[in-house]
Image: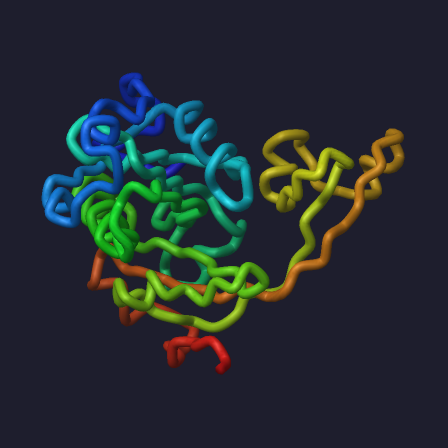
Amino acid sequence: MTNHKKLSASAGSVVVARSEFHQERGGAIPTSALHSIHIAPIELDVAKRLLVEHHYLHSIPGGTQISLGAFVEDSLLGVLTFGVGPTNAHRLVVGAGRRDCVTLTRLWLSDELPRNSESRVLGIALRSLAKATTLKFVLTYADPSAEHMGTIYQASNWIYIGESQASSLLDFGDGVPRNGRTVGHMFGTHSVKHFRKHGVNVTRIPQVPKHRYIYFLDKSWRDQLKPEQLAYPKKED
């Protein structure tokens, strides 16, 4: 597991509630309230419940190591999760080990927050990781099949390093697509052959390559990046 100095995925419990903040105001959080936004660890099951309900993938990845909540006053209005990511992701940076990096795997914010809140929330989370952990860099992926180009990462000055290799998701017949890492954490293997041998009908769902971004929490590691920094991708007109 990643070496954390302060942040913990199993921090004290957090009560999940829309709270009186929304009820009293009867609408979205005002933009001025963003100045009071803060990030704090939340329990994994709290993060999972919100992501399953609200995130477009309706799941939380296996191997999640850090789950953070975005709060305005006492209202929990967002979730960020970080996990192990691809097995050899650390090899993108010379001299890095698995404990030096983490992957941003989920980011969800309530519609109660103003538009364009993602960059601010993400910036606060990254500063928290830089201060409270020994992590050197963070990776993340944007899925063009979901019309995601990584706009929030571009706005936050992440480095674009091209597309990942295309992979497949696995469908066990429940309508929930899962990536191989999540399946491996759940069952100890992601071998389709293994599941079919034991009578489990698994279907592969081909995926398109995803856009890869990297952010250095420790700026002194920037020069050790192996891939070339590329121009940000843009949506075609």
Residue shown at 29%/20% (left/top)?
Answer: 14
Picture coordinates of residue 105 (x, y %)?
45, 46
Which residue is painted at 39% across and 76% down in the image?
A: 232
Report whether 39 appears left or right of 180.
left
Q: Is residue 8 left or right of residue 207?
A: left
The foreground one among 116 and 20 is: 20
| Residue 78 visible to the viewer | yes
Q: Is residue 201 above or below residue 169?
A: above
Q: Residue at x 43, y 71 (%)?
A: 161
Q: Position of residue 187 (x, y in %)?
A: 67, 30
The residue that appears at 40% across and 49% down in the rendered structure is 104
Q: Height in image: 14 above or below 30?
A: above
Relative to 18, say whether 157 is above or below: below
Query: Which residue lies most toward the front here?
Result: 26
Relative to residue 82, is residue 189 drawn left or right?
right
Foreground residue among 22 and 215: 22
